[in-house]
Image: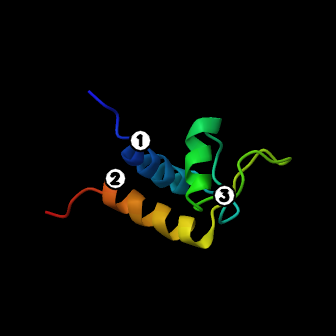
Amino acid sequence: MEIDVGKIDDAVLALLWLTLHNERVPGRGDWATTDRPHKKGMIGDPVNKSKSSILTDEGLERSQALFRELFYAAAQ
């Protein structure tokens, strides 16, 4: 079975929204999972002096939308 890394990237981006502090700074993940969202323009360069990533405007909006889509309970 092949792993869909796009779905993993969406879940990582959604979970980054869950761990935000200072409005745009998510908690750290491993380098591979933060490098892919960086290449897609969703976060700033994850390999920098501060050792933290900053969500771009697009990344912030998408991470919140993905978090709601993937993790909110459906209304009954």
Q: Nearer the viewer, mark 1 or mark 3?
A: 1
Residue beneath the point at 46% across and 54% down? 14
Q: What residue type is labelled 3?
A: His
11 or 22, nearer to the observer: 11
Q: What residue type is labelled 1?
A: Val
68 or 1, nearer to the observer: 1
Above or below 38: residue 29 = above
Q: Position of residue 45 (x, y in %)?
A: 72, 53
Q: Name the residue under label 1.
A: 5
Q: How did the renderer colour the structure?
A: rainbow
Q: Where is residue 64 in the image (x, y as percent from the top left)?
A: 46, 64
> What is the crowding at mark 3: few (fewer than 14 residues within 10 Å), some, or many (at least 20)?
few
Instruction: Give the structural element (helix, strand or loop) at label 3.
Output: loop
Residue beneath the point at 63% across and 62% down? 55
Above or below 58: residue 35 = above
Disc 2 to disc 1, C-alpha distance: 18 Å
Residue 43 in which image quadrant: bottom right
Disc 2 to disc 3, C-alpha distance: 19 Å
Residue 71 disc label: 2
Instruction: Give the structural element (helix, strand or loop) at label 2.
Output: helix
Residue beneath the point at 48% across and 61% down? 63
Residue beneath the point at 70% across and 53% down? 53
Residue 21 disc label: 3
Q: Where is residue 25 in the image (x, y as percent from the top left)?
A: 68, 57
- For the C terminus, the image quarter is bottom left
Task: Check if mark 1's residue and mark 3's residue have beta carbons within 8 Å.
Answer: no
Task: Check if mark 2's residue and mark 1's residue have beta carbons within 8 Å.
Answer: no
